[in-house]
Amino acid sequence: MSETSLSLLILGMALINLAIRYPVFLLADRFRFPALIERALAFVPAAVLTAIIVPAVIFPHGAEAELDWYNPYLLAAMLAAAISYFTRNLLATIVLGMAAFLLLRWWLGV
Amino acid sequence: MTATRTALPAMSRRDEIWHGLRDTFPMMVGALPFGVIFGTLATAQGLSPMQVMSMSLFVFSGSAQFIAVGLVASSALWVIWAATFIINLRHLLYAANLVSHVRHLPQYWRFPLAAMLTDETFAVMELRYRQRGSAGQAHWYYLASCIGMWLNWNFWTLVGLVLGQGFPDLKSLGLEFAMVATFIGIVIPGLKTKPLWAAAITAGLIATLLHHLPYQSGLMLGALAGVGTGLILDLRRKQVKETAYE
């Protein structure tokens, strides 16, 4: 790509991101979502964040699914989920989850 | 950071900023390796230092930046733009989810809070609003989370840019797991009803099955499937309750 195209590329990407991120906040006081949509939005955090995490730990290196006992991402994620479920403590989940991840990776030698 | 359901006292602006930064810190650690790798990779792809930094400063979207760097040698402009659009459509859902908490703010507040909204800040804000609501100085917490992520992202991009391959092996630190652990710790305690569980499970399953689709469209389709499933179950549950009361 030429220098001009690269500048255009970056400018376009920045504008596209703004066009996605800003309009809802911009028009916040002019309209409200219908009740049904408001209700649906309550499921966004659980749905989107899970849709990010699950593939990230099942495909840690990209294309190949690693559904086995040698995948430290998957094992540590399951452990972190259990810790979170029983303790409901975010800091404990982060610290113990990361410690489990490092230990598992060292232990599995991957 | 434990969930408390009693009425919490309002915090001062300074406390809000401090808590916003503190609660975002694990996310900043998680973004570190990706920032460095982005800086290194973009330089290796022939982008000038100015261009690399402009991406992190003005695009401020890890996944879109990585896709752009991967495609820049081979693809037309519109392909990368389209990919940016598809990858970041989820931010529309984030904004819609958070909008009721920022509606009362003037535009000069809403603009930066929207422009700098990332996955990480969304996760942090979702938890914060769930626990403490949006009254008082909550927008300072939000802004601190945004600016923390933004400065962090740009700092580590710069480090990657300057040090390139000379940076010590980040893989050995396991930092890339920080984001996963944090998201898990935020999502699981929020799953309080069956429709919420169903939404999460459906989203994770569909996103995994559709992982092979280009530009992470599986993520968006999985998220939509999850939201749809949750909504349908929620509506049905309400119907059952209403019938029971008749």
Image: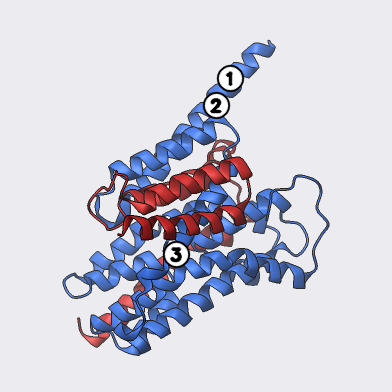
Establish whether labels 3 and 2 are both on one chain. Answer: no
- Dot 1 alpha-carbon crowd within 10 angstroms: few under 14, some 14 to 19, many 20 or more: few
Most foreground residue, B156 or B210: B156
Dots 2 and 1: beta carbons under 8 Å? yes
Q: Chain of mark 3?
A: A
Relative to A6, does residue B17 appear above or below in the rendering? above
Residue at horizontal 34 percent and vertical 89 percent from the top: B49
Relative to B70, does residue A65 appear above or below in the rendering? above
Q: Colour of chain A?
A: red
Residue A23 picture location, percent across and down: 51, 60
The outermost residue toward the front is: A107
Relative to B4, does residue B13 appear above or below in the rendering? below
Residue under pointer 1? B239
Residue under pointer 3? A19
> How far apart in space, not on screen, are marks 1 and 3 (Cα)?
38 Å
Asked if residue B55 can be seen in this view, the reply is yes
Tell us which disc is closer to us: 1 or 3.
1
Q: Which chain is blue?
A: B
Give the number of callouts.
3
Residue A50 picture location, percent across and down: 45, 46
Establish whether labels 1 and 3 are both on one chain. Answer: no
> How far apart in space, not on screen, are marks 2 and 1 (Cα)?
6 Å
Q: Residue A34's quadrant in the figure? A: top right
Q: Residue B113's quadrant in the figure? A: bottom right
- Dot 2 alpha-carbon crowd within 10 angstroms: few under 14, some 14 to 19, many 20 or more: some
Q: Which mark is residue B235?
A: 2
The outermost residue toward the left is: B74
Asked if residue B126 can be seen in this view, the reply is no
Residue at horizontal 30 percent and vertical 52 percent from the top: A59
